[in-house]
Amino acid sequence: MRSWSIPIGRLFGVDVRIHLTFFLLPMFIFWTEYAAHQGNANGPHDLALAGIILACVGAHECGHMLAARRVGLIPKAVILLPLTGVAIYDESRVEKPVEKQVEKQSPPALLWRREIRLALVGPLVSLALACLSAAVVTASGRGVELWKWPFLQAANLPRSVVWANLYIAILNLMPAYPLDGGRILRAFFSRTLDASSATRRSVSISNAIAMVLMIAGLFSDSWLTMVGVIIFSAAQLEERALVFQSVLDNVRLEEVMLTDFATLSPADTLEDALEKAVHSLQDDFPVIRGSDMVGVISKQRILDALRAEGNGYVQAVMNKIFEVSLRQDSLGTAFRKLTARNSSIIPVVEDQRLIGIVTLQNLMHSMALLAESRKLRRDEAES
Ligand SMILES: [Zn+2]
């Protein structure tokens, strides 16, 4: 999920990451400045310009994040690209339950209006910052020519602050998902389409726009190519999140549960249990008495108990409160049950009988595989 980006810190409880396209930016600026000034580029200024753009995107995204928090949507991470940010929601506390809750209170009509409001906050923040910085720059009376081309230039950083914000505000209104204009477009589509079809349609339009920009940039301003590349990368990120979401919603536990697994008995001693655990790849074990499931225990718990209290019985240290699932439950439900109880194993039962287990470890592995195989199947169907 997080490939092509690196973490830089946390803000309002959200992990902030930088996408690799951001590291292309200083090189790109250096290259355009170098070409513009016949080999007279200024490294520190070029880096400062990239830093200004990062700060402006960060401020823009903060606007979205604070607005989203107010309606109860809290992303797990936000990935910053040179023009926009992509919010990533946790696989376990997916946007879904919140959405459903909100849906119950307000009709769908309000939901798409809410999307549009959330999308508009970002460009408004950028526009306000552009006005504010323009006022400060003008008041400073240092003769910064605000209207001199090129607007974004490493040699004139104060002017670049104003224009970086203005560009971010305007470019984000393009109907290219996941830019804000594209989100507004998707909100309109979602009035008649289900969420994933609406997103897919917006992504197709976005890819077309990105392609046109990339090609147009080759014949005119190379910044257009850069914008095209950024839109394309951002749309890819969003699409991947969408595939993940559809795996969560549509895959049943019976498709991924482990049917060949080791079990422990409550009468086993911890040392016996450890011995069994050594011979198994599992980290978590169901504890079975006769045909009844009476508890769950993890390899770590066995080790901790052995260290703290010496040998004893599984019965005494196993977790007796646990959630069970049915074979037709979705992966999303299993994830929520796992995180709600902070456990790492869910027994799958049928007529009170244990027919399989799902562990966090096994879910992570199968999710990635399923996402890949679904994408492959869809690509095949589309071509
Ligand atoms: Zn935005």
Image (cartoon, grey):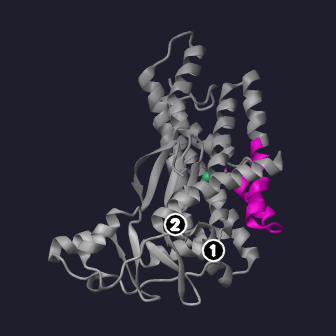
Residue that protrudes farthest toward the top in the picture? 38
Q: Position of residue 9 (x, y in %)?
A: 39, 51
Tell me if residue 275 comes above or below residue 230 in the rendering: below
Tell me if residue 116 comes above or below residue 28 in the rendering: below
Q: Is residue 380 visible?
A: yes
Q: Position of residue 146 (x, y in %)?
A: 59, 32
Out of 230 and 370, give the one closest to the viewer: 370
Badge 2 marks a residue whose secondary structure is loop
Tell me if residue 264 comes above or below residue 84 in the rendering: below
User: In the rendered image, which residue does mark 1 sit on?
Assistant: 99
Determine the main secondary structure of the stretch shown in magenta. Answer: helix
Q: Position of residue 157 (x, y in %)?
A: 49, 31
Residue 245 as seen in the image, left or right of residue 25:
right
Looking at the image, do the residues carrying marks 1 and 2 touch, with CB atoms under 8 Å apart?
no
Kind of residue at disc 2: Ile
The residues tagged by marks 1 and 2 sit, at their Cα atoms, a distance apart of: 12 Å
Badge 1 marks a residue whose secondary structure is helix
Is tag 1's residue or tag 2's residue first in the polypeptide sequence? 2
Residue drawn at the location 48% of the way across and 83% of the way down? 323
Q: Which residues fall within the magenta stretch?
A: 179-207
Q: Which mark is residue 293?
A: none
Out of 157 and 284, give the one closest to the viewer: 284
Determine if the magenta segment contains residue 291.
no
Tell me if residue 289 comes above or below residue 93 in the rendering: below
User: In the rendered image, which residue does mark 2 sit on?
Assistant: 74
Residue 34 as seen in the image, left or right of residue 194:
left
